[in-house]
Image (cartoon, rainbow, N blue to C red):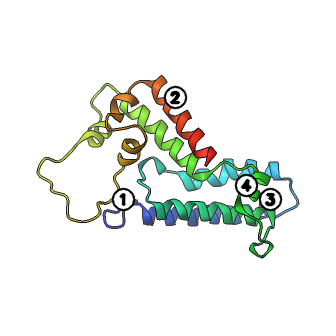
Amino acid sequence: MISFKERTNKEIQRRLALGWQKYWSLKDIMKGNFGIAAKKHIFESCILPVVSYGCQTWSLTAAEKRKINVWQHSVERSMTGIKKIYKIRCTEIRKKTGLRDALLTINKLKWDWTGHLMRKTDERWSLTATEWTPYNLKRRRGRQPKRWADFFRQEVGPHWTKVARDRDVWRRKWKELAADSASQ
């Protein structure tokens, strides 16, 4: 879904709703007396791909990242049967379930796609559209909307396209970023 007005917000809401739909279609497994390992496998192979489909094009704001985190915490609580009234922290539940972080998965998919895209040597429309900057366009006043490439500029620097063309350096940068995310 392409939306110029609300950008990725509608798509994320749609993807999270589809994730819940998939979760409840697997209710017998996810709410049943199966082990955490089986539920984890089902989540990571059936539910998370539904949510992260097409995430390579998302430019996530802090509010959208929070929505994804809240969704994952809710799924974890539901599959373990731990209610909020028990006052058990989400970090404790995450340790118990051992699920992959949805945001980290989304960022990894985006990172891999970008590296793949930047290493292409032929003239593809996807690469041309990524590197294209309109010369007449003036940005409006106030806080600017988040752009797709802002994530890479923030994590790698202004010359991220050159770094992305070197596969080994690009992978090393991801490992550093993933390690920083895991330690937080």
User: Marks 1 and 3: CB-CB under 8 Å?
Assistant: no
Q: Amino acid at mark 1?
A: Ile
Residues under labels 4 and 1: Cα distance? Answer: 33 Å
Question: Residue at 41% across / 24% down in the picture?
Answer: 166
Q: Nearer the viewer, residue 159 or 35?
A: 159
Q: Which mark is residue 154?
A: none
Residue 77: % across, % down:
74, 65
Which quadrant of the structure image shows residue 21?
Answer: bottom right
157 sits to left or right of 101: left
* Residue located 30% across and 42% down the image: 130
Q: CA distance from mark 1 to mark 3?
A: 34 Å
Q: Is residue 112 left or right of residue 3?
A: right
The residue where tag 1 is placed is: 2
Q: Are marks 3 and 4 in contact (CB under 8 Å)?
A: no
Front of the two marks 3 and 4: 4
N-terminal of the two: label 3 or label 2? 3
**Residue pointed to by mark 4:** 94
Q: Secondary structure at mark 3?
A: helix
Question: Are there few (<14), some (14-19), or many (20+) residues within 10 Å of tag 2?
Answer: few
Q: Upstream in the sequence, badge 2 or badge 4?
A: 4
Which marked residue is nearer to the observer: mark 3 or mark 2? 2
Image-based side of 179 in relation to 114, left or right? right
Type of residue at label 2? Arg
Which numbered mark, 2 or 1, is in the foreground of this view? 2
Q: Position of residue 75 (x, y in %)?
A: 69, 63
Write down the residue under mark 2: 172
* Residue at image location 76% in from the left, 52% down from the top: 95
Provide the residue designation for mark 3: 29
Kind of element beneath mark 4: helix
